[in-house]
């Protein structure tokens, strides 16, 4: 086996870093939903791709800047997330059943995407793709750098809110012991709606990042589920920084595997890491 050049290895590490940042951004909403609301929301992935397609449509049809589409997508998805939580809590859907219900929502969203945009591949051609920062012999594309910046900023901001603000303390108290939190005046339903809306808004932001850097197809919703679940489990449930760190680890490891060995080996990386953690530290999750 011939080792690749140092330039290729460096570019692979950067590519893995950028991919891992997107993994972390996608995993953050799922981690908070699972860890703090006890809801395994598989519709999170469908919302991300719905956001990506909306960005594509608004940018190609109305010549809107992809970043400006966030002004529509973020509040819209916040409302969707809060509505989904209302439905799940209204019918007292358990954690396991929430996975089944939201999987059904995912299938419905996929069908909607195919109906509106067909199953053909779509690619957003934005002016951001023309900008690249050269660092020696490697390149840093603008869309990927924006994704990395957004993922780090959102993860740190979420950590700060949860750890240092009254809202964050109320959210953590509700997740830890809802009855005790309610006894101290915490409105659990309001906190849950706020967190659900925030998680859905994160999916919308991730969708804009996907539209900027990836080719779109409705069936790709399911290709992200495995690796994001691995990021969430490795990073820990309800931990804002965990999915980002785990995503970067998985992304870089996948990229190096593709560069050194073969692209066909890359999908094995995330689950191999997850199995290793579960075997060595079974109480980690």
Image: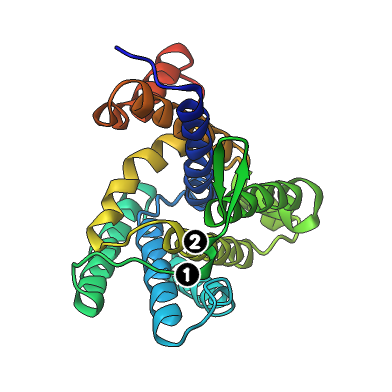
Query: Where does label 2 land, which residue?
Result: 129
Looking at the picture, how far across and down is residue 56, in whole percent? 40, 73
Seen at 39% across and 68% down, the residue is 124
Q: Secondary structure at mark 2?
A: helix
Query: Where does label 1 land, which residue?
Result: 126
Looking at the picture, how far across and down is residue 96, in whole percent? 33, 47
**Is 285 positioned to the left or the right of 223 in the image?**
right
Seen at 50% across and 22% down, the residue is 6
Looking at the picture, how far across and down is residue 31, in whole percent? 51, 45
Seen at 40% across and 14% down, the residue is 279
**Is 123 positioned to the left or the right of 9 in the image?**
left
**Is 225 positioned to the left or the right of 132 in the image?**
left
Quick check: 226 above or below 100?
Answer: above
Residue 233 in view in this figure: no
**Is 186 positioned to the left or the right of 98 in the image?**
right
Quick check: 198 above or below 99?
Answer: below
Seen at 40% across and 30% down, the residue is 254
Quick check: 166 above or below 280?
Answer: below
Q: 19 or 82, which is in the foreground?
A: 19
**Label number found at residue 99:** none
Looking at the picture, how far across and down is residue 52, in whole percent? 41, 67
Q: 84 or 213, which is in the foreground?
A: 213
Q: Extreme bottom residue here?
A: 62
Marks 2 and 1, how far apart at CA: 6 Å
Residue 134 in view in this figure: yes
Categorize mark 1 by other alpha carbons within 10 Å: few (<14), some (14-19), many (20+).
Answer: some
């Amino acid at each position: 086996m011939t080792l690749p050049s140092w330039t290729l290895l460096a570019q692979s590490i950067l590519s893995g870093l950028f991919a891992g940042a997107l993994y972390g951004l996608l995993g953050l909403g799922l981690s908070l939903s699972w860890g703090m609301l006890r809801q395994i929301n598989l519709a999170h992935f469908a919302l991300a791709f719905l956001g990506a397609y909306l960005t594509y449509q608004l940018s190609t049809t109305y010549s809107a800047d992809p970043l400006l589409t966030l002004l529509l997508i973020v509040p819209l998805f916040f409302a969707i997330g809060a509505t989904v939580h209302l439905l799940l809590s209204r019918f007292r859907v358990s954690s396991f059943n929430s996975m089944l219900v939201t999987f059904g929502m995912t299938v419905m969203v996929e069908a909607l995407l195919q109906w509106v945009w067909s199953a053909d591949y779509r690619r957003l051609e934005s002016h951001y793709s023309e900008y690249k920062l050269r660092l020696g012999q490697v390149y840093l594309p603008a869309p990927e750098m924006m994704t990395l910046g957004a993922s780090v900023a959102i993860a740190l901001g979420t950590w700060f809110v949860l750890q240092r603000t009254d809202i964050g303390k109320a959210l953590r108290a509700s997740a830890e012991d809802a009855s005790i939190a309610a006894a101290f005046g915490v409105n659990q339903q309001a906190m849950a709606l706020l967190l659900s809306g925030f998680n859905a808004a994160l999916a919308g932001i991730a969708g804009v990042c996907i539209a900027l850097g990836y080719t779109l197809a409705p069936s790709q919703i399911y290709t992200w589920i495995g690796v994001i679940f691995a990021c969430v489990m490795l990073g820990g449930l309800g931990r804002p920084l965990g999915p980002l760190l785990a995503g970067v680890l998985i992304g870089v490891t996948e990229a190096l595997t593709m560069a050194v060995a073969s692209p066909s080996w890359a999908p094995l990386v995330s689950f191999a890491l997850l199995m290793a953690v579960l075997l060595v530290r079974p109480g980690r999750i």
